Image (cartoon, rainbow, N blue to C red):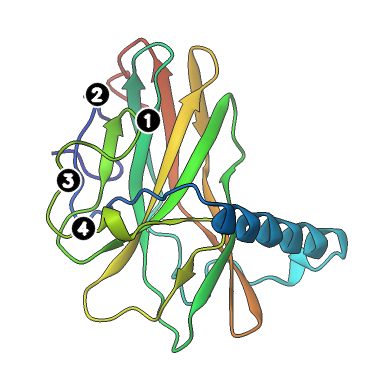
Amino acid sequence: MPHLGTTSSEPGFSAERETTQVALHISWSQGLSARRTAACAAVLACLLAGCASSVPVNSGPFGNGGTPSALCTPVPRGGVLAFGLEEFRNSSSSTAVIQHVALAEPHHLTMLAAYAVPITGHDLYGVLSGYPPAKHLEPGVEWSKRQWANGARIPPTKGHDVTNLVLVLRPVGAKGSAKGVDVHYEVAGQQYLLRTATQILVLSGRECPANL
């Protein structure tokens, strides 16, 4: 079973909680779409106002983004990848609201959807070919309680639970990449940015090299 920081040529695998992962899928609804649009507008307004520079990066309640690593995964030509390797906890005493999720410095890689999935077990969603949800999910992957990542409300984390960020990715051309994932969120009126440290490489129709 591959771990963060390793290269995989397998079309899909399930990652363990210690490595960081789990899944969640969200129903498309008008209410969530409206909330998502409002959240994006709020982030854009902040950027236009020049306040982005004052937003704490990797020092908020969602943690520090993890250990720098890289992951390569192949998908069939024209296929998509469910990328569920990122997880975080809300260490504050207030509900956090995710305002916007985006790939960090993407190159020929498109994010089609992003979900926030509660994890109450030992495994994350993992990295799997195809749209979520997979037919067989590990115990504790609370896919039925998923939310759209944009606009998701994340309560204070209890016990060993985490929230799993699950992205649906598609490479444009032979390969797509990103330096990580940016999660803009707000807690008690304070803006934060979580920037994950796992570099992503998705290859279309060919296996990953032995070394990145």
User: Along the line of sight, which residue is nearer the eye, 204 or 142?
Assistant: 142
Q: Residue at the far right: name it.
A: 49
Badges 3 and 2: C-beta atoms under 8 Å apart? no
Q: Write down the residue under mark 4.
A: 17
What is the secondary structure assignment of the residue under circle 1?
strand
Residue 55 versus residue 16 in the image, above or below: below
Residue at image mark 2: 11
Height in image: 27 above or below 93? above
Q: In this view, does 56 lie to the left or right of 90?
A: right
Q: What residue type is labelled 2?
A: Pro
| Residue beneath the point at 39% across and 81% down | 156
What residue lies at 59% left-to-right and 66% top-to-bottom? 57
Mark 1 or mark 3, which is nearer the start of the sequence? 1
Q: Residue 137 carries which label?
A: 3
Foreground label between 3 and 4 = 3
| Circle 2/circle 4 CB separation < 8 Å | no
How far apart marks 1 and 2 lie (CA) works out to 9 Å
